[in-house]
Image (cartoon, rainbow, N blue to C red):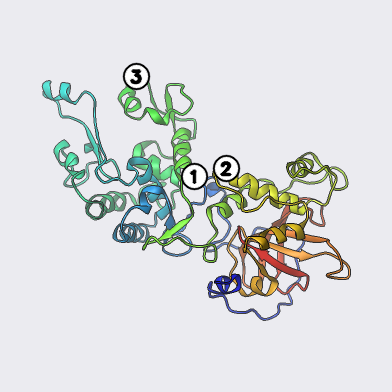
Amino acid sequence: MSMSTLLLLTGAALLAGSSAATAQGSKSAPPAGAGAPLPPEWLRWRGARPEPEGWPHRTVLAVPGLIRQSPQVRRLLLDLARDTGIPVDSIATTIEHESHWNPQALYEAPDNAARIAAGQAPFYAAGLCQVTPSARLPGFGSPEAVKGIAAMSAAQQMAEVVRPLWFRARNEPHVRGAHPGMALLKNFMPQFAGNPDDFVIAEKTGIRKPIFAANRPFDRNKDNTITIGEVYDAAEAVCATARGRIDEDGNRVEANRSATALSFETIAVARLLLGVGETGPNTGPQIDEWARELGLEPPLQWCAAFVSHCFRTAAKRISVAAPVRGSAHAKSLMAQFEAIGRAGSAAVARASALPAGSLLFWDRSDPPGSGPQGHVGIVESDEGALWWTIEGNTVENDVRRVLRPKDDPRLIGMALL
């Protein structure tokens, strides 16, 4: 399939020429909406989305355990998210953390034999959500009933355990719209939701010693305490294991339909650099470092060095290979993407609903087409006749958001990460 055909499958109609003027240097935020830039509290979650049924619609973060599940299980998951308003990515990553989507997962307290000998009830945590008797889920209030969850299929658990558990919680504080860290905390220790990141929820000594003993892996800094921040860190680590998104049938959502995990991470890196600017002509501490990453010495025109830094850094953060080496020259960078079949013409760019994280290229030679000068930016959102981008080396000599009209005659192409 050709790149033009691939991109036109997004269903975007060819757009009539727009007379909208570019908003170079605009500091206003892009409009909100499905697929729009993530809220600030979602930036750390490695591609997870706040929409209940994901974005694109009816897709979910492809965490490893969920990939192995049946379409029925994924459909039940997406239906649960739709009916509760809880982001499907947050539920999926919580279950991945708790059980790796293994319905037979069963935790038995090490002292169960002693408990039974002393006439006390044994302790179990079972199934996809590691439900315990203390959850007081109807039908699963006894240790024996909880242990029995591990004998149920994943689909049966989704219907009889997972759905009632999350449906009951949907109206509790901090649940609707919960990011993955909050969802994991609500499943683990819901009474502490809403406290700051440094709040201690368990420790090696004291009344919460049993909680610490059963959940020691949360103690990432080995200080014998578990904080809310460490629960969030655990959720982020789960999100980082995902490789893009899948629909309910298990089909990978390709780049023509959605930003990939690398695209999401690239946008996150770029947003962190908004406001970075020059301290002299084409130079500055961070700008110079981006040039040196490519084996070049500053000063130099740095829009492509910025973009290359963003996707190279993003690739390292999620442990994937960068699609190309990167370049300090926009047209050379576009040529690298052309060489691997991931670039398209200006007509393709205008006719397609470009996913966030796509790259756009413009000609800056005078007259057009007469030289190597070019410019490149990162698509943050597609707004019909316009794109919001994040660009370096703008007319204000910094990194900022720019509103770009699709009918700009100097647009020469696009690329997909």
Front label number (3 vs 2): 2
Residue bearing mark 3 = 206
Residue at 69% in and 58% down: 336
Q: In the rendering, which numbered label is found on residue 130?
A: none
Residues 328 and 184: in front is: 328
Which amino acid lies under the numbered mark 3 shown in the image of this protein? Answer: Gly
Give the spatial CA distance, label 3 vs label 1. 33 Å
The answer to which quarter of the image holds residue 60 is bottom left
Residue 271 visible, this angle:
no
Judging depth in this view, the residue of 371 and 303 nearest the camera is 371
The residue that label 1 is drawn on is 240
Q: Gap between marks 1 and 2, in whole Å?
A: 8 Å
Residue closest to the eye, 402 or 197: 402
Q: Which kind of residue does numbered mark 1 sit on?
A: Ala
Q: Is residue 228 above or below residue 401?
A: above
Q: Position of residue 36 (x, y in %)?
A: 56, 61
Element carrying mark 3: loop
Is residue 232 in view? yes
Tell me which numbered mark, 3 or 1, is placed earlier along the sequence. Answer: 3
Q: Which residue is mark 2?
A: 317
Task: Say which amino acid is labelled 2.
Answer: Arg
Q: Residue at x 14, y 38 (%)?
A: 144
Asked if 4 appears above or below 364 in the picture, the reply is below
Q: Are marks 3 and 2 in contact (CB under 8 Å)?
A: no
Under circle 2, the secondary element is helix
Q: Which image quadrant is residue 69 in?
A: bottom left
Q: Nearer the viewer, residue 200 or 329?
A: 329
**SS assignment at label 1:** loop
- Tell me which numbered mark, 1 or 2, is placed earlier along the sequence: 1
Q: Quadrant of residue 209?
A: top left
